[in-house]
């Protein structure tokens, strides 16, 4: 399995600030030349897909509105200071926040960001109405901001799926004919225990779900956070997000400098 997608999203934004080496190819541009990968499911994949739904049981809300609240600014600054110093850290921290704090997706995002090579943002909110999404084994449901249920369906694992070569995940489908844009759930292998959050997509078109900068789901990847998360989990997810993306940036800059 490749690492979670959000690790790679903000890299492009840091190039202008972190003068560690030569110019960096963004994660967006890198993925642009990668054809969607076909995955071959095995019995082991099916077992892992079932286990994943057990491991993520709970109710989730969008991650980034929580962790980008101003009360957590210092948690973003500290890892940035360690890598780029105090002077550059505030700008780098803001870029990290902005990269996955977008509010548009699909054609609107394509019109705004093009191929995503510069200035793009990922929308990591829940689309099509849910305020919270609950995973309860094979049952997945969602409620709106008033607490009214929007959908509730039983899902079965059907196949592995790659997000434009960036990451492999598990595709689940419901047989309910009224599922609409909740027919498929495409889950990345993140869990609250491993990365303190979830990454997933849902929709009605499998091919579109496998593309990151094309189609109706372009530049969208839902990031979920447990509604009962404590302050320690908030600190952990911010620290992980910053450290992984800063490390990714340093690695790419060092590789470019050697060429």
Image (cartoon, rainbow, N blue to C red):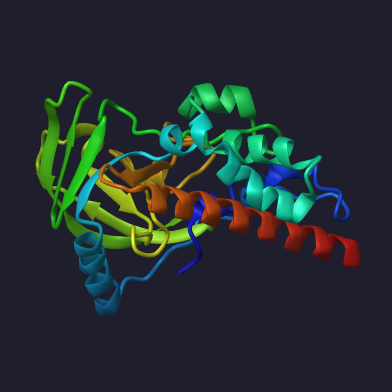
Give left or right: position of 218 versus 202. Answer: right
Give left or right: position of 161 versus 145. Answer: right
Residue in the image at 57% along x and 37% along y: 73
Residue in the image at 43% along x and 32% along y: 65
- Give above or below for 210 relative to 169: above
Residue in the image at 42% along x and 59% along y: 195
Q: Residue 153: x percent and y percent?
A: 11, 44
Q: Residue 186: x percent and y percent?
A: 32, 51
Q: Quadrant of residue 118?
A: top right
Q: Residue 247: x percent and y percent?
A: 68, 60
Examine the rendering and report whether any part of residue 259 can be seen.
Answer: no
Give left or right: position of 177 versus 106. Answer: left
Q: Quadrant of the N terminus?
A: bottom left
Q: Nearer the viewer, residue 108 or 12?
A: 12
Q: Residue 83: x percent and y percent?
A: 74, 55
- Give above or below for 118 relative to 226: above
């Amino acid at each position: 399995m490749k690492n979670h997608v959000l690790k790679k999203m903000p890299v492009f934004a840091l190039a202008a600030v972190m003068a560690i080496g030569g110019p960096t190819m963004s994660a967006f541009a890198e993925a642009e030349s990668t054809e969607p990968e076909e995955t071959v499911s095995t019995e082991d994949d099916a077992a892992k897909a079932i286990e994943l739904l057990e491991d993520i049981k709970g109710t989730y809300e969008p991650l980034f509105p929580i962790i980008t609240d101003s009360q957590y600014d210092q948690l973003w600054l500290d890892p940035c200071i360690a890598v780029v110093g105090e002077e550059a850290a505030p700008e780098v921290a803001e870029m990290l926040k902005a990269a996955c704090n977008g509010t548009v997706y699909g054609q609107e995002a394509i019109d705004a960001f093009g191929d995503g090579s510069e200035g793009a943002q990922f929308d990591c909110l829940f689309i099509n109405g849910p305020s919270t999404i609950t995973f309860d084994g094979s049952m997945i449901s969602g409620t709106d901001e008033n607490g009214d249920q929007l959908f509730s369906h039983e899902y079965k694992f059907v196949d592995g799926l790659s997000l434009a070569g960036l990451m492999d995940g598990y595709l689940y489908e419901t047989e309910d004919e009224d599922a609409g844009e909740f027919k498929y759930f495409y889950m990345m292998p993140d869990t609250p225990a491993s990365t303190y959050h979830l990454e997933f997509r849902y929709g009605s078109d499998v091919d579109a779900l496998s593309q990151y900068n094309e189609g109706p789901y372009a530049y969208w990847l839902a990031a979920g956070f447990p509604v009962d998360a404590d302050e320690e989990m908030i600190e952990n997810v911010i620290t992980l997000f910053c450290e992984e993306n800063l490390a990714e940036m340093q690695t790419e800059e060092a590789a470019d400098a050697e060429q």
